[in-house]
Image (spheres, rainbow, N blue to C red):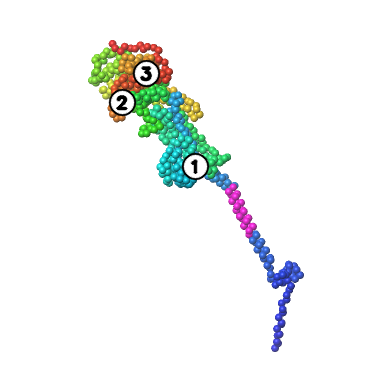
Amino acid sequence: MTTTTPRPAREPRVVEGAPSDPKHRPSRGGPTSPAGPPRGGWRGPRTARAGERRRMLFLTVALVVVLALFAGRLVYVQVVRGPSVAQEAREKRLTSYSLIGTRGQITDRDGVALATSVERYDVSVNQLLVGSYRGDGTEADPDGALGVAKRLAPLLDEDVAELGGRLVGERQFVYLLKGVLPEVAREIFALRLPGINVDKAAARTYPNGNLAGNVIGYTNSNGQGLAGLEASLDDQLKGTPGVETYERGAKGQAVPGGLSEGTPARTGDSVRLTLDADIQWKAQSLLDAQVAATKSDGGTVVVTNVRTGEILALADSGSTDPNNPGDAEEGSLAASVSNVFEPGSTGKVITMAAVIEEGLVGPTDRWTVPYVFTTDNGQQIHDSHEHGTLHLTTTGVLAESSNTGTVQVGAGLSEEKRYQWLTRFGFGSTTGVELPGESRGILHDWEDWDGRTKWNVLFGQGVAVTALQATQVFATIANDGVRVEPHVIAGWTDPDGEYTEADPAPRTRIVSQETADTVLSMMESVVDDGTGANASIPGYRVAGKTGTAQNWLHGKQGITASFIGVVPADDPQIAVSVFLHEPKTSIYGGTVAAPVFKEVAAYTLSELGVAPSGTKPTLFPTEW
């Protein structure tokens, strides 16, 4: 048996500089290890440095990726989406506001403003923003709506408490006051009160109050014409609005050098009328005074240039003040072109012109004129007052305004001829004047006339006309028998100041000059030796006719007293008519209307500088 003796344990060899000795670490390639540390030995330094490199690499890659993302985003924003982003940013900075197109003026024939637009401002509030106001902490200037009210109330001339109540709420737009003067608007704007807005508005104003208000009409708060010429000429008078767009800063100021563009507003055209403000005023004031003196329900005065058809005055009693139209009806305000009534004895002028033009009767033919005349179909015709049998010429029949005589004078006209002459002088159709709401009047076809109407139309009954239609009959006779379409528009001025006259008024011959001269001379006898004596004007020859007729105004039957005249009769320039509806002091036109004619005509002649008559009349005899 073999016994193995254990080998004695070998003490570990200690090698100087081994890892157990912290003071000595062999260097790579030293004498102990020419080829570096033994395989499987300690590798600490190399492992640490590799980790650092990996971390650096990761960070570098991450940084490059991030930079690439930023660079890509930058390229996308600046290159790809650059224009659209810039546009969006600009649009956020842009603000636009409307520019008001000012409404054109309405002036009289001499350029006197009858209607004009002035600069005004509307003050409004956004109630949601008022609460952000911060005062100085004193009782006089507290925070919130009360502070705003205390600062704003004196400028709006309102009570602080009442104004404060209107500032509180949840509405984003509430008007506080419209039509504020520019100097007040500037003070309000300078306060910079939160929620308080000051916007420019063009207000319509009428400097002469109710002067020609029946012709001019009025607009609403938005500047739209509602009545009169303001309505009928709205398309030409109204301006064209514009818009202004600009870049604004944080405080609303325009950015210097920023975008600023827009479309300018255009002022509307201005219209010049044929009306004379002074003549209109005189006619209106005299009419109103006579309406009051005679306790009439109303009245009208018309003044027209017989040669041109220009209406110099068109006055209706109780004319509306366009500054405060109140309950005035829209459309026509001029009773002179919308209300109708029987012309009465003024219509006899048509009968005289017709029979003379037809060669049936002369101005000196003789007639036996009773108070009551019975026609061939048994109709009894009466004169306005009882009288014995008169011996009158045709001129005398007109001068004395005899119904029974006129029926005899016109008997030779057939019913169809009577109708034709009435229509030739303009009855039953509009005159063509530029005012809205003009009536055609009432003229039934002759085939519909009954046994009495066919006689009544000879002396102005059975037919209804406007004041302007009735006046045109006399203007036609005065203009040598030529009818000129009446008009109130003289011309237009564009925003650049260029004036364009209106087209000449249409002209139509109605009767020959010889007939017109004859009838005009016959009408002189009405004033010199008949019912129109109160219409005489010293120094001027006057031709005219009185009238008393029925009307159906305001749904009830009444009386219209009138006088229509031409002056100077030797060289006619103007026709003036006066109508009083339902006068209480007298029903006769020679009594209540002729005196107004005299004063209006005399004033007009003076204003126009018409010289007195240079000749004495040679009148036809009125009796035989």
Determine whether 579 is above or below 44 in the image: above
User: Contact (CB < 8 A) between labels 1 and 2?
Assistant: no
Q: Please, what secondary structure does the residue beneath circle 1 have?
A: loop
Q: CA distance from mark 1 to mark 3?
A: 65 Å
Determine whether 255 is above or below 338 in the image: below
Magenta span: chief secondary structure: helix
Q: Please, what secondary structure does the residue beneath circle 2 have?
A: loop
Indicate whether residue 215 is drawn in magenta: no
Which residue does the numbered mark 1 point to in the structure image?
192
Q: Nearer the viewer, mark 2 or mark 3?
A: 2
Q: CA distance from mark 2 to mark 3?
A: 27 Å
Disc marking residue 566: 3
User: Contact (CB < 8 A) between labels 2 and 3?
Assistant: no
Disc 3 residue type (three-letter): Val
Give the percent coordinates (x, y) of residue 132. 47, 47
Earlier residue among tags 1 and 2: 1
Disc marking residue 295: 2
Quadrant of the rendered structure where residue 355 is?
top left
Q: Is residue 590 left or right of residue 154?
A: left
User: What residue range appears in magenta?
Assistant: 58-78
Q: Please, what secondary structure does the residue beneath circle 3 have?
A: strand
Q: Nearer the viewer, residue 189 or 557?
A: 189
Disc 1 residue type (three-letter): Arg
User: Looking at this rendering, what residue extends furthest in the right direction?
Assistant: 31
Mark 3, residues whose alpha carbon is within 10 Å: few (<14), some, or many (≥20)?
many
Q: Residue at x 46, y 27 (%)?
A: 492
Disc 2 residue type (three-letter): Lys
Q: Nearer the viewer, mark 1 or mark 2?
A: 1
Give the percent coordinates (x, y) of residue 522. 34, 15
Determine whether 434 is above or below 68 in the image: above
